[in-house]
Image: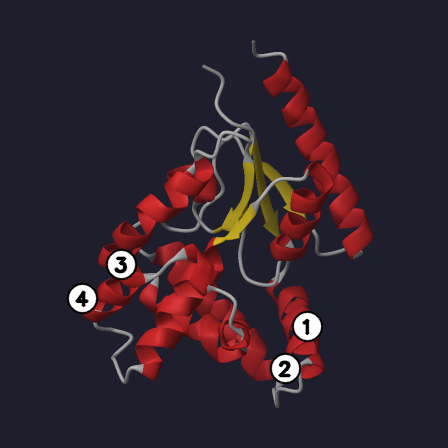
Amino acid sequence: MRPPFVIAVDGPAASGKGTISSDLSAHYRLPMLDTGLLYRAVGVILKRQGGDLDDARSAAQVARDLQAGDLDDDDFRTREAGECASRVAVHPLVRAALLDLQQTFAKRSGGSVIDGRDIGTVIAPHAPAKLYVTADPEVRAERRFKQLKGRGEDVVFAEILEDIRRRDARDGGRADSPMVQAPDAVLLDTSQMTIERAIDAARRIVEAARARWENSQ
């Protein structure tokens, strides 16, 4: 049987992959899962409980109790939440606890858009459409800085850039499901692109993948 039409969008923080994924979800009328929110939720909830982000067992318990419907919380979209997510995501126990939820979403018969760090390599390795969205660290830091300032957060650019570099090293260097470009993913570097150009490029990549998928049967 032909697999469902899954669009896997991977890449580092503030690369534009979230905006691109949201557009692809609306354009193709497919449900979307932002897997980064799962890890943000685990980190924030654990911290609220007074737990230790470096305690793999406690973090995994929070992950096991998490439901996809629990993600509508503005606290999960803050700078602090991003740092929490990167810290709990290194734990294999946490990744294992969230694996079934993500893979079940990827098996939806109508298809889906899934945004994360290891979608094309671990969660949906057979996804017909794979993108790896990236940008230079300085560009990503500037985007995140403006985004957080727009939300009223008191942030310093140099600290945001350091956060970006630290998260890149942590996400790419973890032993379990590191952030890497899948061999069959199309690289989309948005460093010099407006969001409109990036979205157009992403749609063209997906259109080519969809044509191959439709002709596979």
Element at label 4:
helix
Looking at the image, residue 34 lies above or below residue 9: below
Residue at the image point whose x is 33% and y is 53% from the top: 98
Q: Is residue 207 left or right of residue 80?
A: right
- Residue type marked 2: Phe
- Tag 2 or tag 4, which sits nearer the N-term? 4
Q: To which residue does mark 3 refer?
A: 64
Q: To which residue does mark 2 refer?
A: 157
Residue at the image point whose x is 29% and y is 75% from the top: 53
Looking at the image, which is closer to me, 176 or 138? 176
Q: Work out how far the residue at label 1 is from the one at label 2, CA to CA, in angstroms.
A: 7 Å
| Residue 142, numbered circle | 1
Q: Position of residue 177 (x, y in %)?
A: 34, 48
| Residue 57, numbered circle | 4
Element at label 3:
helix
Element at label 1:
helix
Q: Work out how far the residue at label 3 is from the one at label 1, CA to CA, in angstroms.
A: 35 Å
Q: Position of residue 9 (x, y in %)?
A: 56, 45
Looking at the image, residue 115 lies above or below residue 79: above
- Tag 3 or tag 4, which sits nearer the N-term? 4
> Mark 1 and mark 4 in contact (Cβ < 8 Å)?
no
